[in-house]
Every structure is written in C-alpha cells, then in structure tokens.
Image (spheres, grey):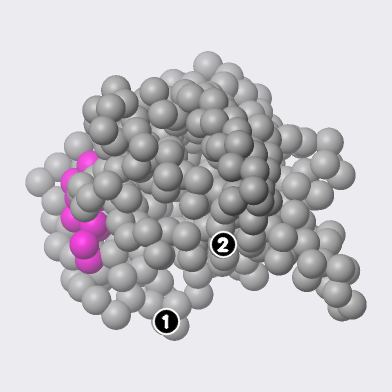
Amino acid sequence: MTFSVSVVIPAHNAARTLAACLDSVYAQTHPPHQVIVVDDGSADATARIAEGYRRPAGGPPCTLIRQWPNRGVSAARNAGIAEATGDVVFFLDSDEALTPDSVANALEILEKDPECGCVHGVIAPEPLFDDGPVERYRVLHAYWWRARGAGVVETAFFAQAAVRREVFERIGGFDEGLRDSEDLELSDRLAPHYRIVLTERVMAYHDEVDRLGPLLAETYRRALVLVPALASARRGGRRNLTANSPASVAAAAFTLAALPLARRRPALPAAGLAAFCAANAGLLRLAARRHGAAFVPYAAGVHFLVIGSLLSGAGVGALRMLLPGNQAARRRPAGERT
C-alpha cells in the first residue's frame, strides 16, 4: 500500500521560517499529495510567502487557508484536517524544516504496523537558524530528551507527526480551547486506541527562542499546567514523555532550597549542583561533543535556570488547583512535559 499524504502547516507570523519549512516539504523523497498552510491571523508576510508556492517547481500547489482573528494552533490544525484528503495527515510546525526522508520513514513505520496510529519525530540537535548559545542549548536539550525516549510511547507531539486520517474520524480533532498542551490532551484520547511511535528517523530543524528571558518565561508559563497533566496521566494509567528526569528536578530543587544556607553550609548547594550535573551527564556529554568543552558550563547553567523556572511554574499551578472553582482544571487532561 502506498499512502497519500496531506502536509498541514499551522502558521502564525511565520514569515521568518515558512519558506525554509515549505522548501523542506517539497524536497521530501516521498512527495506529498497535498500541502496546506493555515495562516492563523498573521500580521506579517506569512500568507504572501505561502501564495508564492501555488506553482512550485515540483509537487502539488500549496493550499492557503486564512483564519481571522488568531484562534490558536489547535483550531489551525483542525482547519487543515478538514481540508486534507490524504490517507495520512503529516503535521509540521511552520518554524521547522524536515530532513528529506522524514515523510517516507514515517509512512514506512505506519505501513508495517497497522496498529500504529501516529509516528512523530525529534528535533535536530542543531537549530534551523543559529542565533546564539541560548538557541543551541534549547535545541540540543529538545533533541536529547526526545531521542532517549524513542520507541513505542504513550505521548505524541505534533510539531512533526504523521497521523492516519482514521484516527481523527474515531477520536475527533484537537481541543480548540487549548493554546498550550493540546498535544497531550489529544494523546490522552489517542493512546488507548492506537500505538504511538517516536523515532529519530523523522527529524526537523527548529528555529527556537534565542534569548534567556523569553525562554524562562515560556518554561514558567507552560509549567503552570504541569501538575494537572501529570495527575491526568496517572489517572489514565499512562506515563507522559518527560523532558527532565526526576533526579534532575529533585537535585535542582534541593540546590535552590539550600541556597539560603550557603554562607553557613556551602557544601549543601555545592552537593546539589554536583548531583544536578550528574543527573544531566548525558545532556552535558552531548553538549561537549556538539559544541566543545567550553560550552558545557554554559549549558549546565542555563539548564539549571530552566529547571528553576519549571519548578516555580509547577508550584504556582499546584496552588491554583487548590483554590475554589478550579476543580475542572484538576480533571482536565492537559499539561506540559517536565
């Protein structure tokens, strides 16, 4: 069987990256049957760039769907699903560019395993556009934690993912009430019925945040729904893929708690930092291989700050769950990977 593939690209103010994204789609070794860009209320040249692919050198013309005002990635993906006619819907975020065999590899996995409903991939260890050390750390970490979890999983991330059309006919589309963690909510409905595979054979270069302040703010915001996500997964008997090991999070928490005692007992935070580095030894070894030994202390420091922001957001989110009127938040299957 040869699957036909509809590539769906949700895009919001994606003028910087959309051309690279589309070029990677049209360069696939398995040509797409259909390419759909959903412009979700952009105020830049996103639509004009997509229109420039209406007569591509090879492959089908790009179909442009425009939504106004901005409705979020869930609504954009659902609009793409409604327009798609392929056997498989391949989602690709507009700030990513696929490696040439990604679509073919995803289809091969789906074809060999009829019980598999979704194949998703990893972030490449190098950024799409290299804007400095923060971005280098960010994509390296994204690659590392996904690659170590490759195999049959219970969580799907749809930044680069191939999904059988029948999946949406059975379980429905994305929850348009969610602007974050929509992938985990859909995973809660997907995993009981279909196998999910995470593979390095599907890979995309990502244009990530390149400044420390926005990175920490983004981590904090997403961590606000972490506790509800973990509670939902536990109730369903599932384990979400996690970006950070419990040992890493615990070591960071211990170090932060020990900082007020640093003057009297400096060995305590020092021991916490040592434990933190040991818990992240794989990530730090990868940082050394990719960017040299001098990059390792920088990566460790930024990673520690990221975990600190995650702990802060998760703590605030947990407190919010305890407030009156938040019972629905306790039940809702949403959240961000730790």
Q: Position of residue 27 (x, y in %)?
A: 20, 37
Q: Which residue is mark 1?
A: 68
Compared to residue 1, the image places residue 249 above or below, namely below
Residue type highlighted by circle 1: Trp
Which of the two residues, 28 or 201, is positioned nearer the viewer here?
A: 201
Q: Position of residue 135 (x, y in %)?
A: 31, 49
Q: Residue at x 30, y 43 (%)?
A: 136
Say what secondary structure mark 2 lies in. helix
Q: Position of residue 295 (x, y in %)?
A: 29, 36
Which of the two residues, 20 or 244, is positioned nearer the viewer here?
A: 244
Q: Position of residue 183 (x, y in %)?
A: 59, 51
- Please state which of the two labelled residues, at mark 1 or mark 2, is closer to the viewer: 2
In the drawing, does residue 329 fall left or right of residue 161? right
Place residue 297 in its image quadrant. top left
Indicate whether residue 18 is drawn in magenta.
yes
Q: Residue at x 36, y 68 (%)?
A: 12
Place residue 191 in its image quadrant. top right
Chief secondary structure of the magenta span? helix
Judged from this view, the residue extending furthest toward the left is 57
Residue type highlighted by circle 2: Tyr
Which of the two residues, 143 or 331, is positioned nearer the viewer here?
A: 143
In the drawing, does residue 318 fall left or right of residue 302? right
Judged from this view, the residue extending furthest toward the bottom is 69
Q: Would you say residue 117 is visible in this rendering? A: no
In the drawing, does residue 197 fall left or right of residue 250? left
Q: Which residue is mark 2?
A: 220
- The magenta segment is 15-24
Say what secondary structure mark 1 lies in. loop
Tell me how far mark 1 sits from mark 2, CA to CA.
28 Å
Q: Would you say residue 48 is visible in this rendering? A: yes
